[in-house]
Image (cartoon, rainbow, N blue to C red):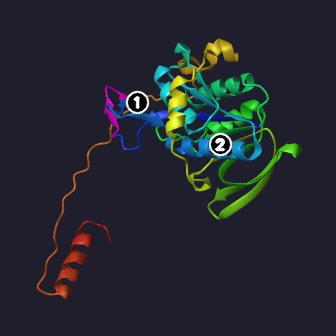
Amino acid sequence: MNIVVCIKQTPDSAAKIAVDGGQVTWGDAPLVVNPWDEFAVEEALRTKEKHGGKVTAVCMGVETAREALKTALAMGCDEAILVSDPALKGCDSLGTARVLAGAIRKAGEVDAVFFGRQAIDSDTGLTAGQVARLLGWPALTYVAAIAEWKPAEKAVSVQRMTDEGRQVVESSLPAVISVVKEINEPRYPSFMGIRKASKTTIPVWSLADIGVAADQVGEKGARVGWAEMYAPPARKVVCEMIKGETPEETAAALVDRLIAEKVI
């Protein structure tokens, strides 16, 4: 099977967000593979190990995004591709989807594309569905388990997580699959994998390479923009201890205070 897994480089989940000059900043927090995407990489690798083939990691970003791709290679991915172009600055989710769909088309005959549920920096959870729509492939979202791969029949059966439980869905291949954390436990990069990743050449594809017009991505192609960004005002919290001579007096004083504050 020829599998593509799309990843994103994001700030570490422990980063503190601030707004500086109308721009969101994470300070000097380290950049890592989006945690949700680690589950996608793991499931792609498990699929390859069971059915053969190769796994290619694809990331859209600037030069520093190579480090995220090296992590995917160290985990076991066979190849990695960075899509980078100055015109990508200011991409919304639709622009990102156009870029990833173009890269997937260029990758050749792909059987499945894996995504994490969402990115922890933007939290939209839209990109996987948008990529599927652009490719004209089925979108299998919130996947908590792969029930069965049927490579010979070009089909897959999955379990989708819903509010009511799990939903079993069968789909034709190729398909776009976005996964949730219940699907597996991501492996750690091995020492040999890290050494191999450090020596692997990661090609860089431009918009021209993937056949995407510059006016369809970035700020020019964005359909969603941030008119203004600001930090919410700090909440003033006052702690008041309610006391009484007896538990009954304390309870009565508490009720009176809650009524005064219009809580009850």
Residue extending farthest top: 208
Which image quadrant: the N terminus? Answer: top right
How far separated are the C-alphas under marks 1 and 2? 41 Å
Q: Which residue lies under the disc numbered 1? A: 228
Residue depicted at 50% across the width and 33% down the height: 194
Which image quadrant: the C terminus? Answer: bottom left
Q: Classify residue 109 as left or right of residue 191.
A: right
Residue extending farthest front: 192
Quadrant in which residue 36 is drawn: top right
Q: Which x, y percent locates residue 195?
A: 51, 30
Out of 27 and 32, give the one closest to the viewer. Answer: 32
- The answer to whether residue 212 is visible is no
Q: Are marks 1 and 2 in contact (CB under 8 Å)?
A: no
Q: Badge 1: how crowded within 10 Å, few (<14), some, or many (20+)?
A: few
Q: Which x, y percent locates residue 81?
A: 61, 24
Residue depicted at 79% across the width and 29% down the height: 109
Residue extending farthest left: 245
Q: Which residue lies under the disc numbered 2? A: 45
Above or below, 228 relative to 123 = above
Of mark 1 and mark 2, the one earlier in the sequence is 2
- The answer to whether residue 133 is visible is yes
What range is drawn magenta here?
16-23
Above or below, 222 relative to 251 = above
Q: Which x, y percent locates residue 255?
A: 25, 77
Out of 104 and 56, give the one closest to the viewer. Answer: 56
Q: Badge 2: how crowded within 10 Å, few (<14), some, or many (20+)?
A: many
Instruction: Indicate the amino acid at tag 2.
Output: Leu
In magenta segment, residue 19: yes
Instruction: Indicate the amino acid at tag 1.
Output: Glu
Quadrant in which residue 154 is drawn: top right
Q: Name the mark on residue 85.
A: none
Q: Is mark 2 on a helix, strand or loop?
A: helix
